[in-house]
Amino acid sequence: MLYLNRETIAKLGGGSSRLYTQALEEALSLHAGGDYVQPLKPYLRSSGKNGHIADRIIAMPAHIGGQFPLSGIKWIGSKHDNPQARGKERASGVIVLNDAESHFPIAVLEAGLISSMRTAAVTVVAAKHLARVGFRTIACVGCGLIAKAQLTSLLEQFDHVQELHLFDQSTAAAERLADQLRGQFPQVNITVTDNAEQAVREGELVVTCTVTDTPYIPYEWLRKGAFISNISIMDVHKEVYLQADKVIVDDWEQSNREKKVLNQLVLEGRFSREQLYAELGEIVVGAKPGREHDDEIIILNPMGMAIEDIACARLIYLQALKEGVGVKLPLY
């Protein structure tokens, strides 16, 4: 069994958006074609009903087809106060890959880097189809590890971006991220705003990267033609789903659960599968068009799919075999 830590994964290409964009396009195409198995992911919440929404461990199993079928699971924990209380990253985890024929485990990979980068790749792939052509401004609310991966990937893939507008409840966190990005992308004008509204109103592309459990973005903050990649799921008000020109998810069954905003609307009888415009994979393979005019307001609500993690881990694993790197662990 092969073990790949974060440093090794990064050296294999896992620190760059290119690998993840390739893997995500493949995973979403497999999703659209039905060449996958993906049970609903269970949430383990040991802190009870009064715990923070971001305090959980999630098991994400999946099987993906294609030229090299693999099964696997991402086991990822999250504690919202890890950075402040323990000096650790909010999320941590491992991915286990299993041989598709024997079902024997063949690899274990550190999941934190993969998880953050594949989440960023979801926004990149979606933006190719759903953002305005040549968009120049990005707004990001929340400035932690996920935000860094999102913005780095977007700036790597879209060289026409000219402005970033950042907000975080911790001004220090926002300023720190701004300084890091200025060092990497000196051609981009980066502004730290005083509040979320200021940032969101500027964004042709809006990315949410928070741990909030209370929606705070109303429809009127969104400019005409905005694409919002609602990565942290709970940030936008219900009215945004009801008034947006197009609502898109990665997977309907995965998205319509856990009392998230979309699920609340379904339970209230105000939204349904029929009102959904598309799953993202349908747009990637061309079964449905993405953006059709410049003024459309489009929201993507990606709960995150295990097939995305397994597709990324598969590419990294195959590259590790090719280069002969990693630590071999005896199973017996």
Image (cartoon, rainbow, N blue to C red):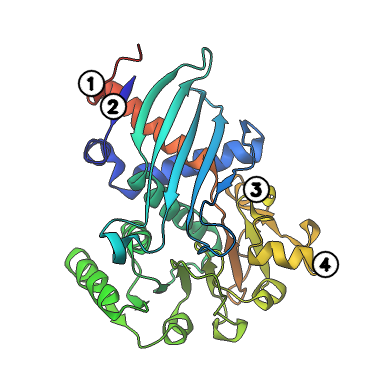
Left or right relative to 303: residue 265 = right
Marks 1 and 3, the one that precedes in the sequence:
3
Q: Which mark is residue 320?
A: 2
| Residue in view at x 48 percent, y 67 percent | 133
Sort mark 2 into few (<14), some (14-19) or many (20+) by Cα contacts within 10 Å: some
Q: Which residue is mark 4?
A: 269
Q: How far apart in space, not on screen, are marks 1 and 2 (Cα)?
A: 6 Å
Front residue of 110/316: it is 110
- Which kind of residue does numbered mark 1 sit on? Gly
Q: Which residue is mark 1?
A: 324
Sort mark 4 into few (<14), some (14-19) or many (20+) by Cα contacts within 10 Å: few
Occupied quadrant, residue 328: top left
Marks 2 and 4, the one that precedes in the sequence:
4
Front residue of 23/93: it is 93
Look at the image and tell me in which quarter the C terminus lies: top left
Q: Which residue is mark 3?
A: 282
Occupied quadrant, residue 7: top left
- Residue mark closest to the camera, 1 vs 3: 1
Relative image position of residue 287 (x, y in whole percent): 68, 47
Relative image position of residue 5 (x, y in whole percent): 26, 36
- Which kind of residue does numbered mark 3 sit on? Glu
Q: How far apart in space, not on screen, are marks 2 and 4 (Cα)?
A: 49 Å
Marks 3 and 4, the one that precedes in the sequence:
4
Marks 1 and 4, the one that precedes in the sequence:
4
Relative image position of residue 50 (x, y in whole percent): 56, 65
Q: How far apart in space, not on screen, are marks 2 and 3 (Cα)?
A: 31 Å
Q: How far apart in space, not on screen, are marks 1 and 3 (Cα)?
A: 36 Å
Q: Secondary structure at mark 4?
A: loop
Occupied quadrant, residue 325: top left
Q: Secondary structure at mark 1?
A: loop
- Which kind of residue does numbered mark 4 sit on? Gly
Q: Secondary structure at mark 2?
A: helix
